[in-house]
Amino acid sequence: MTMLNCNGRPLDLSVPVVMGILNVTPDSFSDGGRYIDLDTATAAARRMAEDGAAIIDIGGESTRPGAEPVSAQEEMDRVLPVIEALREQLELPLSIDTSKPEVMTEAVRAGAGMINDVNALRAPGAVEAASALSVPVCLMHMQGEPRTMQQAPRYTDVVAEVKAFLRQRIRQCEAAGIPRQHILVDPGFGFGKTLEHNLALLRGLSGFCDLGAGVLVGLSRKSMLGMLTGREAHERLAASIAAAVLAVERGAVVVRVHDVAETADALAVVNALTGNQL
Ligand code: 7PJ
């Protein structure tokens, strides 16, 4: 699984890498409203590429707790122009953060090379669409749906349950023709989880490596870090770096972050010690 083919663009996962977050939504919780026009969005993405991102994840629907859903058309209007522009401007692979099969299809046509789905391809037609597109996919665990998921998250054994869910989704994807080497998995920090659930998942993250798929994590600026530090989203850089380093030490190969330069520096130190490249 070390080298992924993302719609013609290679993604080398022999060493843990940074995925930069590009939100193209008016309501994203930490940088909402900043990437409103095409030039601003593409400039932010170019900056992330310069800062060491290996891939950029482009999302047009907010999935933060309490967020309302948007239509496929609205999502496409937000993300497609950005993907088309960035495909020309950058050489690195682009990822589309969506749960809707029609958005997946149009985004990959526009140049996206990975599908990142917080719903793990559970929407009707999503597995089939992803399989037909022949790009790598990230399957994330979520309990409930964004609007209500933080109301009363409940598990008996969160690590075992999330792992069983991901194992089942991998099986479904393989049955639909998506090769195991094209699958990444993500425990979904903050998606229908209390602080204790999130900590248990981070503590037990290495257990996810034996699912036979690369592990991706999104911990950047999340509210669990706010609960631990008492800080607002824009003040969570140090906490986010600590979380990214701990995740990589426990086997994560992709870390999805807002602060690309700082995380890339932290991973350069981690990677030097883990011997992957020495
Ligand atoms: C995640 C995501 C995550 C993956 C978001 C935020 C909320 N995709 N999309 N994993 N989180 N794969 O960035 O805080 O954790 S949206």
Image: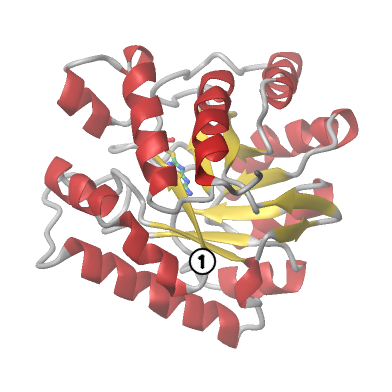
Out of 127 and 277, give the one closest to the viewer.
277
Quadrant of ligand 1: it is top left
Say what amino acid the circle numbered 1 marks: Leu
Check the picture and name the quadrant holding the N terminus: bottom right
Q: Residue at x 23, y 33 (%)?
A: 224
Looking at the image, residue 166 lies above or below residue 252? below
Q: x%, y% of residue 19?
A: 59, 38
Instruction: Indicate if the residue with disc 1 has its beta carbon within 8 Å of ligand 1.
Output: no
Q: x%, y% of residue 155?
A: 13, 63
Q: Left of 223 or right of it: where is 100?
A: right
Check the picture and name the quadrant holding the C terminus: top right
Residue 219 in view here: no
Q: Left of 189 or right of it: where is 160?
A: left
Out of 221 and 237, give the one closest to the viewer.
237
| Mark 1: secondary structure | loop
Q: How many marks?
A: 1
- Farthest bottom residue in view: 175
Looking at the image, residue 206 lies above or below residue 177? above
- Colour scheme employed for the rendering of this structure: secondary structure
Residue 254 in view here: yes
Q: Residue at x 38, y 51 (%)?
A: 250
Residue marked by disc 1: 121
Q: Left of 227 or right of it: where is 100?
A: right
Q: Residue at x 57, y 57 (%)?
A: 100
